Structures are given as C-alpha cells and as structure tokens.
Image: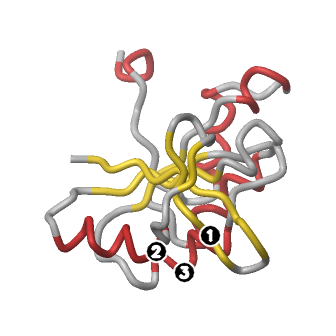
Amino acid sequence: MVVSIDYKEIEPGKFRIFTYGGYKATDLDPVEFALRMQDNNCGEILLCSIDRDGTLSGYDLGMINNLSGRLEIPIIASSGAGSLQDCINAFKAGASAITISSMFLFTDQSPIKVRSFLWSKNINVRASKSSRN
C-alpha cells in the first residue's frame, strides 16, 4: 500500500499534513506520520510538497533526506521537478522513485528524455513498454 503525504511548511522548519487538496490543515507532522505508517506496514510513501507543486523549483530535498534517513520503506518524491538535475537531486537525497508532471507540460522535457538522462547517470529506470520491443 502507498500512503500519500501532502504537506506544507506552516512556519520555518515546521510542517503539517494537509487534506482536501491542501486547504485543510491537520495536526499531523509528516515525518511522525510517515514513521507511523511504516510501523503499520505501509509499503511506500508518496511525498508531496504542496508548496512546491507546479512551481518547477525542485523537490523538497531536505524533507526527502530527513525521511530517507529514518524510513526503511521507499519514498516516491513528488512536486517540484523543473529540470533534469532536479530529478538527480531527488535520488541523491534518498528518493527511491520520482513523479513528474509540470515539467512535462511546461518544458521541452519528455519521459523518454528523463529516462535516458537518468540511465546515463547510472540511475536504474524501468523500461517502458515501447522500449521492450
């Protein structure tokens, strides 16, 4: 099971999980919640920074690094990819996988370009159906 954690920074260094598309704050800290989900046999965490979503400003590397050092389950980094280097940075920070949306919509990057770039940097990527032929 994948658990999605959508969070915002509510003051410097203090984060909270939000629901309802980022409109309703909870009292839950994303790190504590991720650890609790791991203890409850979650298979992986989809980590979504609401503040970075759609900004093309890069993933929240601090949060990825913090969680990857504390979790034994994979982290899927989401929200913020704007360049090929952002993708590399997420993996270096500890992500096991990444999601990309706005970068494909608002730049000339494509899934094929991203996969080729990651492969050239020795990051294992899944083969697409079209590349298996």
How far across and how far down the image is residue 3, in percent?
A: 33, 50
Q: Give the residue type that dot 3 points to.
A: Asn
92 vs 16, nearest the viewer: 16
Between the C-alphas of marks 2 and 1, the distance is 9 Å
- The label on residue 15 is 1
| Contact between labelled residues 1 and 2, with CB atoms less than 8 Å apart | yes
Query: At 37% from the left edge and 69% from the top edge, which residue is drawn?
Result: 33
Disc 3 crowd rating (10 Å Cα; few below 14, some 14-19, many 20+) is: few
Where is residue 124 drawn, in percent x and y? 45, 53
Residue 66 shows which numbered tag?
3
Where's residue 25, x and y in %?
57, 53
Secondary structure beneath dot 1 equals strand
Residue on which the image places disc 2? 31
Amino acid, disc 2: Val
For mark 2, give the secondary structure.
helix
Closer mark to the observer between disc 2 and disc 1? 1
Q: How many marks?
A: 3
- Residue 106 to residue 8: above or below: above
Q: Residues within 10 Å of mark 2 (few under 14, many from 20)?
A: some
Q: Residue at x 71, y 42 (%)?
A: 53
Residue at horizontal 84 percent and vertical 50 percent from the top: 57
**Label 3 – label 1 distance at C-alpha:** 12 Å
**Dot 1, how many residues are within 10 Å of its Cα: few (below 14), some (14-19), or many (20+)?**
some
